[in-house]
Amino acid sequence: MLKGRIYRVSGPVVVAEDMRGVSVYEVVEVGNERLIGEVIGVEGDKAIIQVYEDTTGIQVGEPVYSTGYPLSAELGPGLIGSIFDGIQRPLTKLEELIGFFIKKGVKQPSLPRDKKWHFTPLVKQGDKVGPGDYLGYVQETEVVKHYIMVPHGVSGTIEWIASEGDYTVEEPVARISGREVTMLQKWPVRKPRPYREKLEPDKPLITGMRVVDFMFPLGIGGKAAIPGGFGTGKTVALQSFTKWSHAEITIYIGCGERGNEMADALHSFRKLIDPKTGKPMMERSVFIANTSNMPVAAREASVFLGVTIGEYFRDMGYNVLVVADSTSRWAEAMREISGRLEELPGEEGFPAYLGSRLASFYERSGYVKVYGNPERMGSLTIIGAVSPPGADFSEPVTQSTLRIVRALYALDVNLAYRRHYPAINWLTSYSLYIEKLREWWMQIDPEYPQLREFFSKTLQREAELEELVRLVGADALPVDDRLILEVARMIREDFLQQDALSLDDAYSPPYKDAWMAHAIKLFYDKAREAIDAGVPFEKIRELKVRERIARMKNIPSTTPREEMKKAFGELYNEIINEFNALIEEVKTRV
């Protein structure tokens, strides 16, 4: 083990000398307390190290030990339901051992070494195997079947395979051409896991959020950003994605977030039941908690740790969602470390490599054909929050992110102040996946393209009329424009607005979205017909069916599909009957 000594200390950045032979991104142990660090630069015999723990108290001259391996994630049974810090220390286990506060230098295996898992083999002696092939599986939770795969770089003939039984993650379960394979794998967090082929997504990742699924759909394996100022609901939106999305595995990364928000997320997840499986949500989730009071250097590690775990489950053939809240805190940590390294600053003090570092995270998403037998597809979807100061989307982190992602969900401060949640602005948000996902949506509703276009044009027309309304008032507008304003209000309040705390409205399935959209479009069509027949606009605004339309979002999403379809059919009939009665009344008067 190479041993150097501390030459200089500057916050989380330590310079060590006598380190010739150490490599960039190698893990080292710093000081007498053996704090975990990572080499980020080498100059002669000096190594520049970013330390992932509090460096208070360490002194010049203390030893630095190299380990010879890069910062790696432990992958295997025991990941699901776990809560890790930024460098994959198991927080629940540490709480049992040392209490609520983590001490410096404390180490604990990420995955339990003493727990036995019931292994079921899927291959037999003499079989030819290669990277990614299934060797067997462990039923990690009632929801997740954890496949044990041949590690990358290993191939050959099965000389021995363990019989069905209970094993720890360190016990061999197979021997392939002389190499023993355990259920535990390690993978460098900064190195993307390989795959055979990346494909364009042809299915959406259903999130249960109408403004996303219906207006700006996100493809499985896609990458999206959700920027917004303070108080616009980023954290609640990301937690909703994690709770209700149709991903089979969800990974929530709290990167520099407030401790109370992480505590709230963890507390609520322990109580939630997955609507698809009826099992606890924790049985398909992994949490990485790197709060704002933890060392800043660990923020970068937490982001890459989360995406590495996501790629591991993707390689099993699962659809995985990784949520990072927020990448701005990570960028701020990069700026702080860059300043301590005396690097030439870029825009607003951020390092010049800000864009490439963000891309190295987002570009690990994808809908891919993975290595291994049986042949399978897997996906890794990434949604990152951005916290621009003062809700200024022109700042460097937001702009760098926009050049990478293919879907933007822009949170609007004004919408949040009006208590319109989710506060996603329908005029500035976009999705580049719409064309690819159009065919999928048309299987749900053949009229989806027309409905979405109608909603978009109506909301855009409302925005164009806003200035005129402020000048002369809505009552002075032509009746056609007044109808547009009324229907746009219905789209905003009765469709796009959604209550994340309501059990009936927090999640909305695609078919419910389509039926709700049809109700609003039907109201518009019948209103146009009534206006053409001479019905005064005030009479249209007094219709009782408007209240029924406003309440349609409260139809529980757990309602059986046929029963829900019947309820919407009754609503459609009510709209038609009330408008027909109005038209008849006008004709009678004439």
Image (tube, rainbow, N blue to C red):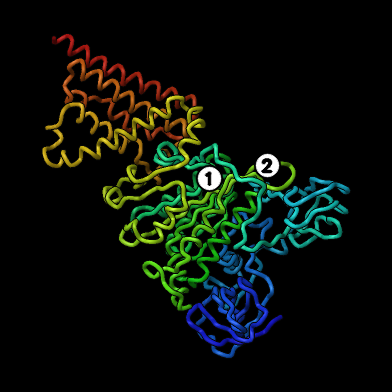
Q: Where does the N terminus fall, quadrant-wise?
A: bottom right
Tell me the residue that label 2 is attached to. Answer: 376
- 211 versus 29 height, above or below: above
- 185 versus 455 height, above or below: below
Question: What is the total number of numbered labels drawn onto the structure image?
Answer: 2
Q: Nearer the viewer, mark 2 or mark 1?
A: 2
Mark sitting on residue 431: none
As shown in the figure, which amino acid type bears the numbered disc 1? Ile
- Contact, CB < 8 Å: mark 2 with mark 1? no
User: Who's the residue at 53% across and 45% down the image?
Assistant: 273
Instruction: Look at the image and tell me whether residue 423 can be seen.
Output: yes
User: Who's the residue at 64% across and 42% down the image?
Assistant: 377
- In the visual, does 517 lie left or right of 334? left
Instruction: Look at the image and tell me whether residue 142 can be seen.
Output: no
Mark sitting on residue 273: 1
Q: Secondary structure at mark 2?
A: loop
Toward the viewer: 291 or 45?
45
- The tag earlier along the polypeptide, 2 or 1, is 1
As shown in the figure, which amino acid type bears the numbered disc 2? Arg
What is the x, y in percent for residue 553?
37, 34
* Residue 172, image quadrant: bottom right
> Few, some or many C-alpha atoms within 10 Å of disc 1 (few <14, some 14-19, many ≥20)?
some
Q: Where does the C terminus fall, quadrant-wise?
A: top left
What is the x, y in percent for residue 220?
54, 43
Q: Secondary structure at mark 1?
A: loop
For the residues labelled 2 and 1, the Cα–Cα distance comes to 28 Å
What is the x, y in percent for residue 353?
48, 65
What is the x, y in percent for residue 314?
62, 49
Q: Which residue of the protein is positioned furthest toward the bottom in this rendering?
A: 61
User: Who's the residue at 44% across and 31% down the image?
Assistant: 512
> Few, some or many C-alpha atoms within 10 Å of disc 2 (few <14, some 14-19, many ≥20)?
some
